Every structure is written in C-alpha cells, then in structure tokens.
Amino acid sequence: MERPDGHTHFGYRDVPLGDKQALVNDVFHSVARRYDLMNDLMSGGLHRVWKDVMITALNPPRDNAPFALLDVAGGTGDISFRAAKAAGPNFQATVCDINTDMLAVGRERAQAQHLDDRVRFIEGNAEALPFGDGEFDAYTIAFGIRNVPRIPLALKDAYRVLRPGSRFLCLEFSSVTMPGLDKLYDMFSFNVIPRIGQAVTGDAESYRYLVESIRRFPKPDAFAGMIRDAGFSRVKYDIMSGGIVALHSGWRL
Ligand SMILES: C[S@@+](CC[C@H](N)C(=O)[O-])C[C@H]1O[C@@H](n2cnc3c(N)ncnc32)[C@H](O)[C@@H]1O
C-alpha cells in the first residue's frame, strides 16, 4: 500500500512504489506457463471450490439477458470461463490483465474450450482501466488485488466502469485465525510452497513473494473499509476455509 515516504511492500521487501508493478510483472512472466498447474498443486484443488463460490455469488443470468462481465487481473481466464459456462447465450466476459504472458495462456485455453467467442482478453492496468464509464454489469477480481500497487485507485476505477445497480466481487487470500490451522498454514506456505514452485517452475522466489504478499494484504475489515471508501454500498465479506480466503462484495448503486 502507498505510504507517505513513497515506498510500498513487495512481499516482505520495502520498494519504491514506482518499482512494484515491474517486480509483480516479472513474477507472472516467470510463472505464466505453469500458473494453472501450480494453483492446483498449492491449494490441493481448493482454488476451484473458492472460484465456484465466487461464480455462485456472481449469479450470471442463465436466460437470454445480455450480461457483460469485467474480470480484472483475470490472468489465464479461470473466473471468466467458469462464469461463461454457468451463463446464458448473451453473456460476454472481458479478461483484463497487465501481463501479456498470462493473457496469451488465457487465449489458448479459451480456444481449447471453445469459449473464445464469449471471452475476450485485453491488456490493461487495474489502476486505469481501458474502458468507458458504466460499461459493465459486474466486476470480478480473483487473487489479483493484492498485487496491484495502488489498491484505492483500482477500487475507484472498478466503481467507474460499473453501471449503477451492478456488483463488485473480490476473491482474495485473507488471514487465518483458526487456532491450529494458522501454524500449519504458515509452515506449508513458507516451507512447502516455495519448494513446489522451485520444482515445477524453477522459480522459488516468485512463490515466496506470493506467500509474503498474502501476509501484507489488509485484514478483511480494513479491506472492506477500502471498498466502502471507493463508493460501494452494502459491502460485506464471507470467510472461507478457516480464513485462508475471503470473498468481498459490494454494490455500485
Ligand atoms: C494470482 S494471478 C490471478 C489470476 C486469475 N484471476 C486467477 O484467479 O487465476 C494475479 C494476476 O494479477 C495480474 N496483475 C497484477 N497487477 C495488475 C494490474 N495492475 N492490473 C491488472 N492486472 C494485474 C497479474 O498479471 C496476474 O495475472
């Protein structure tokens, strides 16, 4: 998060705010080709359950109603594919991500699943989205917001691109508070995940950053306050898996 001295955190490191995005981009350039496999290995497949909960909350129309989803930091397209499969024929998803390698993997996956007519991939920064005001019926961001250097800017731009009466949904790692689970989770995160990262992607450092960035992300109440500050109403969150993940939501009214 931005601080008065112009620095922010990159995992446990202190870096100039202006340097963070390039460091984040290096992480996802490095892991893009193995990103989806790593998600399954690191979470034991649980990320699929968390993403399904997000799609249930999104509740895209099953009938012929048109619906435009913007999936920011959408990476290789997981959320948009799930939404497209759950939705009716006039659903359109736009995956917007800053990283061309993640988008390239996403486009290939869309073609392989015959979803390329319903899911498009566009390069863009969550802090300054390349879309007009009120263009979308819903905004999703899954495991993306903690990587964005200026989160308040991203939340403000989320509000701008949503039409009045539409939904903001953010799935993100949160804070484990369940006694017993917290120690196990720390041990797994700091010892096992970087090793899996090394074995599968040849890059332990990127996975060390991912683990550390989770610890630096605001607690759920504080993040809910930031969503409110961006203008959203009826802001709430639901904790999943003992606090490993939270689904935050709000409405643009
Ligand atoms: C952990 S991945 C999440 C991908 C996908 N949403 C999922 O759940 O599998 C985080 C993504 O955030 C993207 N990202 C990081 N900073 C961004 C920014 N400022 N604007 C847009 N995307 C960004 C990265 O390129 C990466 O694809």
Image (cartoon, grey):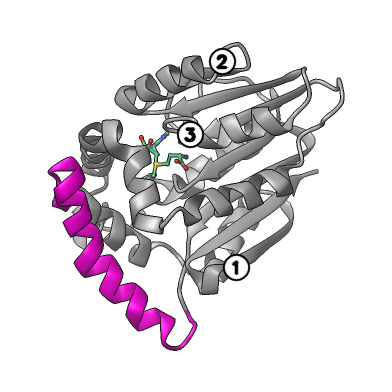
Q: Element at badge 3? A: loop
Q: Amino acid at mark 2?
A: His
Residue name at image x 49 percent, y 42 percent: 153
Q: State whether residue 123 appears in this view.
A: no
- Asked if residue 191 lies in the magenta stretch, the reply is yes
Ligand 1 in which quarter? top left
Q: Within 10 Å of the Cα at label 2, are there few (<14), some (14-19), or many (20+) other Cα atoms?
A: few
Asked if marks 1 and 2 touch (Cβ < 8 Å), the reply is no
Q: Amino acid at mark 1?
A: Ile
- Nearest the viewer among 59 and 27 is 59
Q: Element at badge 1? A: strand
Residue name at image x 86 percent, y 20 percent: 64
- How many numbered markers are drawn? 3
Q: Within 10 Å of the Cα at label 1, are there few (<14), some (14-19), or many (20+) other Cα atoms?
A: some
Q: Within 10 Å of the Cα at label 3, are there few (<14), some (14-19), or many (20+) other Cα atoms?
A: many
Q: Is residue 187 above or below residue 174?
A: below
Q: Amino acid at mark 3?
A: Gly
Asked if marks 2 and 3 touch (Cβ < 8 Å), the reply is no
Please state the horizontal and vertical placement of residue 221, each as a whole percent of the image. 58, 70
* Mark earlier in primary sequence (1, 2): 2
Residues at marks 1 and 3, CA–CA distance in whole angstroms:
21 Å
Q: Is residue 104 above or below residue 155?
A: above
Q: Element at badge 2? A: loop
The residue wearing badge 3 is: 74
Asked if ligand 1 lies within 8 A of label 3, the reply is yes
The residue wearing badge 2 is: 114
Residues at marks 1 and 2, CA–CA distance in whole angstroms:
33 Å
The residue wearing badge 1 is: 239
Q: Is residue 237 left or right of residue 8?
A: right
